[in-house]
Amino acid sequence: RGEKVSSSTIYDLASVTKVLATTPAVMLLIQEGKLKLTDQLGFLLPRFAHTDLSNITVQQLLLHEAGLRPSVSFYDALIDQSSLNGRLTGARQNPGWVQLDTNSWGNPFFTFRPELVSRTQNANYPLRFSTDLYLSEEVKNILLNTIASTPRCGVGNYKYSDLGFILLQQIVEKISGKSLDSFVEERIYQPIGANTLGYQPLNKFSASRIAPTQNDKFLRKSIIRGTVDDEAAACLGGVSGNAGLFGTAEDVARVLELFIQEGSYNGKQIIDRKVFRQFITTHGKGNRRSLGFDKGRASMADSASASTYGHTGFTGTCVWVDPDNELIFVFLSNRTYPNRLNKKLMTEGIRPKLHQAIYEALGIGA
């Protein structure tokens, strides 16, 4: 039997992190004159200066037009290859393998590299990978070097990428001198009273208050509850630009209230109005994106205005802000529990239907 949820249940927000943490962090650095949309990655982060990624601009990262791959299985680097009999993942079922997705299976019979993964947290293994697995700082270097050596394709065209938002996180941290979680907590969440919003929620809240995201029988071999579901963000210890943020629906709505007021909350201007407007009105190829935000019509209500922006998340989350109709919409779920094969939320179009029901109940639009 499932546990009951309430308005105080904390959810893994998945890619909604991109618009509630990374994008506003970039806005703050732009309003302070510390960052420009035209700045290039190689200039901002010297480790990328002599790579194929050096001329990527901040604007290209925000619009998903940098030609980066959607994602990379960074966790491959954590596996002791000599412990594997055959491949780690494949398109066919083998005895004892775990089904990961429709045509994807994982081989759970492996051991981790002891120099990178430990069952105890200490100075050598500070990063939390799951409830009882911890990573060396070296994993972050491996991850960034992997991104640096990943070939680009289709530069200038829209291609959704988690890697771009991991790079934006590195930019924010380098320029601000703070980790992304500290920066957004101090500058955004605390001033608006969004007390449950943040990364690594187990540092503040009991696991019983957090919705579990999956029973991971393949990689982390535990129930993922309070540590980030997304493997790339987990390889960064739970603080990432692409995922890792947790919070309640009410606190998510506080940030959307800040957005619908164009950077103002309770009369206090937190994000410069001109900068905020620039982000929601600068559109990429095919009008699919504004800076950081999704504008994809298929994921929202038919009655939502053309100015609507927001984002969806892999765990079944979504947020939409419709400034024309002064409407914000927050939907949080853990559709990936107990595993990622549960796709009814997408196949039945639940989120856009719920969004549309709100418009109809209010007598707005079509």
Image (cartoon, rainbow, N blue to C red):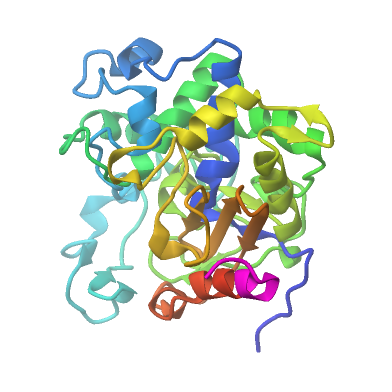
Tell whether position 107 is magenta: no
Magenta-drawn segment:
358-366
Q: Is residue 267 left or right of residue 255?
A: right
Q: Is 241 placed above or below 9 here?
A: above
Q: Is residue 312 visible?
A: yes
Q: Is residue 128 visible?
A: no
Q: Nearer the viewer, residue 36 or 118?
A: 36
x and y percent of residue 259 in the render? 65, 40
Q: Is 237 placed above or below 101 here?
A: above
x and y percent of residue 292 in the render? 46, 38
x and y percent of residue 348 in the render? 43, 81
Residue found at x 52% / y 67%? 222
**Which quadrant is home to the N terminus?**
bottom right
Q: Nearer the viewer, residue 132 or 240?
A: 240
Residue found at x 22% / y 14%? 50
Work out which residue is located at the far bottom of the displayed protein and give it.
Answer: 1
Q: Is 365 placed above or below 178 here?
A: below
